[in-house]
Image (cartoon, rainbow, N blue to C red):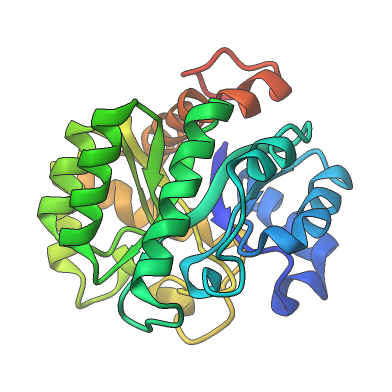
Amino acid sequence: MLVDSHCHLDYPDLAADLDGVLARAEAAGVGRVVTISTHVARARIYEALAERDARVFSTIGTHPHYAGEEPDTRVETLVALARHPRCIAIGEAGLDFHYDKSPRDVQAHVFRTHIAAARESGLPLVIHAREADAEMIAILSEEMARGRFSAVLHCFSSGAELARVGVELGLYVSFSGIVTFNRSEELRAIARSVPLERILVETDAPYLAPQPKRGKPNEPAYVAMTAASLAQTLGLTPDALARATTANFYRLLAKAAALDGVLAGEGAA
């Protein structure tokens, strides 16, 4: 079984055909899907998506694009919302200096709030990082020194140094369809440098469809294509990559493991 560890089922391209999206995912061997929060104000939408289908988990957090809309979200609010039975992580939160849709200082403040919530809740943090490697390294290093927390660098497209520091700090690294692109040899080299036990796979659907589907809306089923490409990059069979990444998912996302009755660190049938 594969897990799409990061997608957005509430976005129109997926929400309009949710039953079909999940059926195609299952047919492709993708048995679990995590729908990721971008706005705390939309918490009930994410909860409802996870409640309607046992294949779906949810998270709670504010994407850096929208940090300016939710600058005052409190740690207590995030922790309380994270108690929902099917909410398995905090985020996504982080830094995006490519689009700069929110002021950078506000992004950093909101990100640190989410780190505190991850610590307090005991749930891992889903981290968004784009064109902010130095600042991300500085915040992660400083915050980890204050108190440890678990996290994943999602949709990794940053440099080798952030991957290296992330692994040293105990973080996981998740690869999306970007790793399949012809121009992504540098990213594939980074993937080869990450220990297998720290790797996850995702779609970030409806964005970033892998090479065979590039230019079309992405969906969770296509994580199988990303996983196959990543397996080739790492010199593994697709089955071996699926087993490893699913075991990694359940090790990091212990609440999901408990919900599925899976021993953390083991795959699911």
The answer to whether residue 269 is visible is: no
State the quadrant of the C terminus: top right
Placement of 174 over or under 86, stated as above or below: below
State the residue at coordinates (61%, 55%). 73
Locate residue 3, reporting x and y percent: 56, 43
State the residue at coordinates (44%, 81%). 214
Does 126 sit left or right of 168 as displayed?
A: right
The answer to whether residue 264 is visible is: yes
Does 17 sit left or right of 223 as displayed?
A: right
Number of numbered discs: 0
Placement of 153 over or under 219, stated as above or below: above
State the residue at coordinates (58%, 39%). 89
Q: Nearer the viewer, residue 20 or 208?
A: 208
Locate residue 1, reporting x and y percent: 57, 36
Placement of 148 over or under 140, stated as above or below: above
Locate residue 209, reporting x and y percent: 48, 73
Residue reaching furthest to the top: 263
The quarter holding residue 166 reads top left
State the residue at coordinates (89%, 47%). 52
Locate residue 193, reporting x and y percent: 13, 43
Does 28 sit left or right of 116 as displayed?
A: right
Q: Nearer the viewer, residue 243 or 79?
A: 79
Does 44 sit left or right of 199 as displayed?
A: right
